[in-house]
Amino acid sequence: MRADVFVIIASCSVAAACAPHDPSAPKGAEPSATRQADVNLPHDSRIIAARVAAGATLASVLGDCKIAHAEVAGVVIRAASIFDLRKLRAAQPYRLERADDGLLRRFEYEIDSDRLLRVTRSSSGAGGVSDAAFVAEVLPIPKTRVLASVRGTVDRGAPSLFAAMDAAGETVDLSINLADIFSGEIDFNIEVQPGDRFELLVEKQYRDDHVFSGYGPILAAEFDNAGRRFRAVRFAPPGGTPGYYDERGVSLRRFFLHSPLKFSPIVTSGFTRSRLHPILRELRPHLGVDYRAPIGAAVVAVADGVVVEAGVSGGAGRMVHLRHVNGYESEYLHLSTIAVRVGMHVRQGDLVGRVGASGLATGPHLDYRLKKNGAFINPLTAQRAMPPADPIPATERAAFSDVRDRVFAEIAAPPATRHAAIAAAHQQQ
């Protein structure tokens, strides 16, 4: 009987010859174009593990790895029946098992961190170009979940939330998730300062090979900012959507986000009635806030609304204009791309475009503007005056208090006790 052995070649990238990447090469280095030997398995099969090359299709991936031409059409037809192959993404890992005669035994492609596309040969033994020769499935990637507490401090060596989170051994994703929770209370663009500290309880996910696979939800968080302490608890009322509340049960979600950027370290120009225009060299009002950000950074809607403009608008370049309730409007200028169309309804946090330098701009940045009853107002001061969303209903206060007390106790708990807490926490999350 043939042994089923799977050998993973880490950090591979597929060129035309399916050549694995040299694992000793520096991080981010280009893959070698030199063909290397496939992994020999017992009897009559080989494993090829690599990453999808830019511009590749499923057919080209299979062909480059020397799957028999008669097999490729059947695999593509079967895979396309359950997955949109136009969404095959460069740099995503895949693995296939190929018999020595070029027949495909198994193909696996990681759609994202949670799902796997798997194509295997049908047990009926059918062959040829017919898709009946194969079975395709989209499967969840098995993961182990653990709860972990994370602590960090902003100081001279780590002068931003990004840097402090990195010093704590975590990734940028957790920084963004934490900033999203407190975005209604803290402007992480300008208000973070040395001495600020954070502590949180988060679910971490690991694959069966013990490789870290990403973060689940933050269950509780605390952030000390310039003498102010903010606490957040994740709670889902029965039949409702999970949200974050302070320890009294008041929602942390405000009518407007502090900023339409997930994260931006510098405000380069504030709201003013008289500013020397950097290109026209004349005094003009600057009726918004400029955020320095790299080209392509996501720009999101600061509140629920309707798109009233989405296109090129003179010196504003590519611009999106949203109308909100209570007489509010928001504008997003100098975009590189626009992700919405006129008449579309958007929710707070939805992508509306990406940072660029279109129109009259000296470099990539976002000019964000806010109106109230037709008049421009200062976005940096207006947000705090807006009320939060609905609090925890009185009927759910007892349940909320139980979740709050449990998750904040877990932050300080030893790691060995946290595994048992996941199921209990998720009963309410």
Image (tube, rainbow, N blue to C red):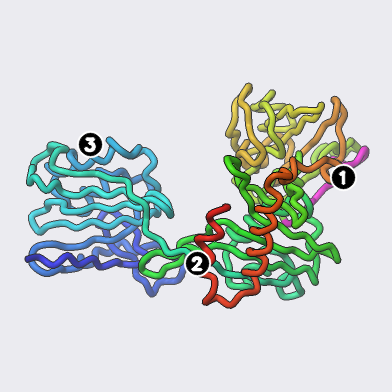
Say whether residue 321 is magenta.
no
- For marks 3 and 1, the one nearer the N-term is 3
Mark 3, Cα crowd under 10 Å, few <14 / some 14-19 / many 20+, is: some
- Which residue is at 16% across, 38% downward? 131
Q: Looking at the rendering, which quadrant does residue 136 occupy?
A: top left
215 or 155: which is nearer to us?
215
Look at the picture and state if 131 lies above or below 224.
Answer: above
Q: Nearer the viewer, mark 3 or mark 2?
A: 2
- The disc at residue 77 is 3
Amino acid type at mark 1: Thr
Q: Determine the secondary structure under disc 3.
A: helix
**In the rendered image, which residue does mark 2 sit on?**
146
Say whether residue 276 is magenta.
yes
- For marks 2 and 1, the one nearer the N-term is 2
Quadrant location of the N terminus in the rendered image: bottom left
- For marks 3 and 2, the one nearer the N-term is 3
Q: Are marks 2 and 1 in contact (CB under 8 Å)?
A: no
Q: Looking at the rendering, which quadrant does residue 353 occupy?
A: top right
Percent across and percent down for residue 339 are 58, 34
Q: Are marks 3 and 1 in contact (CB under 8 Å)?
A: no
Residue 295 visible here:
no
Percent across and percent down for residue 310 are 65, 27
**In the rendered image, which residue does mark 1 sit on?**
381
Amino acid type at mark 3: Ile
Look at the picture and state if 34 lies above or below 367.
Answer: below
Mark 1, Cα crowd under 10 Å, few <14 / some 14-19 / many 20+, is: few
